[in-house]
Amino acid sequence: MKASQRLSDLTAMSVDLLQDELLKLKKEQFNLRFQKATGQLENTARVTEVRKDIARIKTLQRSKTVAASA
């Protein structure tokens, strides 16, 4: 999925949905790290995608909390 399309999907989510998505991505990141350690990781680019998605979600969560408090 393209980053801009992914970003538009994420901005439409509520804070609770973003938290759920963040939890899902962190679990996936753990599984990818485990696969890498055991030598079973096939798609190495997915590690970078997951890291960037986590950063996007954290950024959106922060901006939404700042906007809500302002």
Image (cartoon, helix red, strand yellow):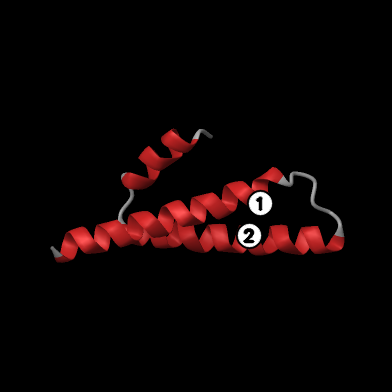
Q: Nearer the viewer, mark 2 or mark 1?
A: 1
Asked if residue 38 is positioned above or below residue 48 in the image, the reply reads below
SS at badge 1: helix
Instruction: Tell me, yes or no, whether the two marked residues, 2 and 1, touch with CB atoms within 8 Å.
Output: yes
Residue drawn at (34%, 61%) of the image: 16
SS for dot 2 = helix
Q: Residue at x 55, y 57 (%)?
A: 25
Residue picked out by circle 2 = 29
**Amino acid residing under circle 1:** Val
- The spot of residue 44 in percent (x, y) is 73, 47
**Residue 20 vs residue 44, the one in the foreground:** 44
Disc on res. 12: none
Q: Residue at x 28, y 57 (%)?
A: 63
Where residue 53 sits in the image (x, y, percent)? 50, 50
Mark 2: give few (<14), some (14-19) or many (20+) Cα within 10 Å: some
In the displayed structure, would residue 55 be above or below residue 7? Answer: below
- Estimate the x, y position of residue 60 in percent, counting from the top left: 34, 54
Q: CA distance from mark 2 to mark 1?
A: 7 Å
Label 1 belongs to which residue? 47
Q: Say which of 9 and 36 sits in front.
A: 36
| Crowd tier of the residue under label 1, counting other residues whose Cα lies within 10 Å: few below 14, some 14–19, many 20 or above | some
